[in-house]
Structure formats: C-alpha cells, structure tokens
Image (cartoon, rainbow, N blue to C red):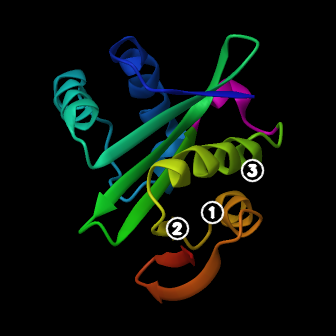
C-alpha cells in the first residue's frame, strides 16, 4: 500500500465515502453532508497546517483516508474512513499503520481516537495499531496511543 497526501482532486471520493450509509451510521454526525458543506470542510482541512490528511492506494485504487487533527501541539485526533468498495478486505489496519508511521516522522505526539462503542472493526483496527482504551463517554470509546 502506498500513502500520499490528500489532494484537492480527492474531494469527490471523500464526499461519497463520508455519505455512505455505513460511514453515516458510525459517525458522530448522523446526517448526510451537502456537497457545499463538504467542499468548505475539505478545502479548510487541506489548507490547515494542523491537519495531516493521507490517502492509501493499492495499484492506483483508492483504499481510504486517515486524518490527523493536531490539537494544541500536544496530541492529534485520528480518524479513518475506507472506500466502501475496499471494506471487508482487512485493509484498515495496514492503512492506519502506514499513515501513523508517516505522521510520526512529521510530529511525535500522542494520538487519540474517538470510536462509536459498537464499531468493533474500527476498535480492532486501532487496537492492532497500539492504541489502548482510555475512557467511555456517551456512545463513544476513546483510545490513546503514546
């Protein structure tokens, strides 16, 4: 798998993946995003030096994205979303692992993830990448990686 920085031309794919019914179900925000709001969010993230956004590829096929949102230069919130066509292939663990390696070359800080309690595949993916359970709040578990 190859990891590259997300580019402006990836916006439509990210939009489709975010509005996929499985992504919506496991998301904190339960609504479909409008294209206008997505484009504002996407462009803001691309231009933000505190956001590192990576896309995974296998043979030029887009696997998914991993986003690192740096908070107060002390930790980064990590999120992952797979291309729905690439799910159920055990690729999320690899994608997340490679993205973390690329990110920590840039910045060595703690990482945390907020995962819906019933998103067992995502929980497993993060645990297999050295995250450990920290706490539960409402419908979400929080995991940390030092």
Is 99 left, or right, of 54 in this rendering?
right
Which labelled disc corresponds to residue 119? 1
Task: Locate the C terminus by quadrant.
Answer: bottom right
At a point 42% along the width and 38% down the height, the residue shown is 53
The x and y percentages for residue 25 are 49, 51
Which residue corresponds to mark 2? 116
- At mark 1, the secondary structure is loop
In this view, the mark in front (3 or 2): 3
Write down the region rendered in magenta: 82-88
- Category of crowding for the residue at label 1, using alpha-carbon neighbours closer than 10 angstroms: few (below 14), some (14–19), many (at least 20): some
- The Cα atoms of the two marked residues, 1 and 2, are separated by 5 Å
At a point 21% along the width and 32% down the height, the residue shown is 47
Is 34 left, or right, of 136 in this rendering?
left
Direction bottom: furthest residue: 135
The x and y percentages for residue 95 are 68, 41
The x and y percentages for residue 98 are 68, 43
- At mark 2, the secondary structure is strand
- The Cα atoms of the two marked residues, 3 and 1, are separated by 14 Å
Whichever of callouts 3 and 1 sits on the residue coming sooner in the sequence is 3
At a point 66% along the width and 66% down the height, the residue shown is 123
Whichever of callouts 3 and 2 sits on the residue coming sooner in the sequence is 3
Quadrant in the picture for residue 85? top right
């Amino acid at each position: 798998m190859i990891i590259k920085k997300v580019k402006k031309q990836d916006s439509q794919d990210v939009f489709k993946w975010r509005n996929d019914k499985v992504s919506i179900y496991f998301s904190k925000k339960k609504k479909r995003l409008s294209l206008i709001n997505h484009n504002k969010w996407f462009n803001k993230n691309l231009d933000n030096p505190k956001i590192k956004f990576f896309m995974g590829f296998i043979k030029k096929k887009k696997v998914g994205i991993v986003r690192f949102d740096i908070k107060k230069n002390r930790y980064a919130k990590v999120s992952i979303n797979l291309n729905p066509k690439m799910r159920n292939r055990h690729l999320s663990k690899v994608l997340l692992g490679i993205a973390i390696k690329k990110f920590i070359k840039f910045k060595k800080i703690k990482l945390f993830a907020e995962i819906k309690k019933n998103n067992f595949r995502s929980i497993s993916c993060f645990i297999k990448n050295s995250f450990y359970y920290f706490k539960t709040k409402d419908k979400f578990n929080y995991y940390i990686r030092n």
